[in-house]
Image: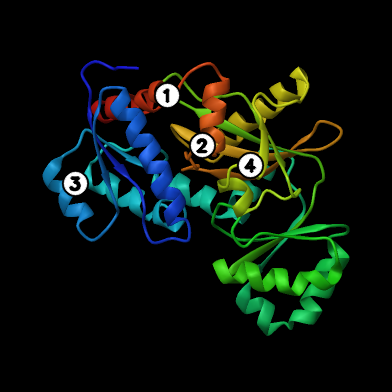
Amino acid sequence: MSDSSGLYVVVLAGGISHERDVSLRSGRRVADALAEAGHRVVLRDPDAGLLPYLANEHPDVVFPALHGSSGEDGSLLDLLNALGVPTVGSTGAAARRAWSKPVASSLATHAGLAVPRSIVLSNEAFRELGAASVLRVVREALEGDLVVKPGSGGSAQGVTIVDEPNELPRAMVEAFTYDDVAVVEHRVHGTEIAVAVIDTGDGPRALTPVEIEPRTGVYGFQARYNAGETTFYAPSRLSDAVSTSVADAAVHAHRTLGLRDLSRIDFIVDTEGTPWFLEANVIPGLTETSLVPLAIEASGTDAATVYSGLVRAAAARAQV
């Protein structure tokens, strides 16, 4: 869909995080959609030449499609703000709140959202207090199946489902491979749901919730980015009442964390219809197998329209 009076947009993709390849795929999709909408688009890696390039070029808007620490820990977003470059997405401070899973969960709990019980462990404490003693306390405090995940990061990297006690030590090692903090969480059984929240200037609104049904039962990295590994239902198979509840919870989480423009909020909906907050993503995947594009299509619009609306909102915000 063509958009008259196109803007000069720099899409950032790549980076050096574990999610570089996914970011490149997201960036290409965003760039293609914005070009379709009539914008002049340049796709760039966030390398050592990026900041001088932006300072010299003065693009109308930057659209980060960077996953992992390259874009989601708030560092780059702070620098873009310092340069005065209008940017799609959240502020650096908001990104840091969402990037830290323990912080996001604490804020969500305080805001009244249902959040699984968890114990947060630093690698240092885990070693100093003795792995065996720590894991014994964890098992006694968190009954049933567990989820172990890094304290930050995305694409389910370093995440392990633990349904046998002897699997917990290896799960901890896997999580600490990606972060110095690990979260051990009670596993809520139910339906995995992702909700995209979009704000093009009229306030945040939830798009159609997307239901996730992995072939293996676990929505891990391979299931996320390899076609055929997961069945997606957009719209989800939830009842209208539960769908509305999940959508409301997503917008509430988005507002609670102070997010802006675009986010994806992930939930598990239990058998009673309660949405349990898992995490928030400030720069969600936008690849051909990602959830936000599915939600956009299911909501009756298209990526070119949505992404163009986001860059125009960012440009307008800079004028205020």
Q: Earlier in the sequence, mark 1 or mark 3?
A: 3
Image quadrant for the N terminus?
A: top left
Q: Is residue 264 visible?
A: yes
Question: Which label belongs to residue 54?
Answer: 3
Sequence order check, earlier mark of 3 and 4: 3
Could you tell me which secondary element the residue under label 2 belongs to? strand
Instruction: Return the residue found at the far left.
Output: 56
**Gap in Å between the C-alphas at discs 2 and 1?**
13 Å
Count of number-bearing discs: 4
Query: Which residue is rendered at x = 72% and y = 82% of the image?
Result: 129
Relative side of 163 to 37, left or right: right
Label 1: which residue?
A: 306
Cα–Cα gap, marks 1 and 3: 24 Å
Nearer the viewer's eye, disc 3 or disc 4?
Answer: 4
**Amino acid residing under circle 3:** Leu
Per the image, the residue denoted by label 2 is 263
Q: Nearer the viewer, residue 233 or 100?
A: 233
Per the model, the C-alpha gap separating discs 3 and 4 is: 39 Å
Residue at position x 29%, y 54% in the image: 46
Residue 164, quarter of the rendered image: bottom right
The type of residue carrying mark 1 is: Val
Task: Give the left or right position of residue 118, taking residue 313 as reference.
Answer: right
Across and down, in percent, residue 300 comes to 53, 16
Q: Which colour scheme appears in the figure?
A: rainbow
User: Is disc 3 surrounded by few (<14), some (14 to 19) or many (20+) residues within 10 Å?
Assistant: some
Q: Amino acid at mark 4?
A: Gly
Residue 121 in the image: state x and y as whole percent. Answer: 67, 68
For label 1, the SS is helix
**Circle 4: element type:** loop
Disc 4: which residue: 228
Amino acid marked by disc 2: Ser
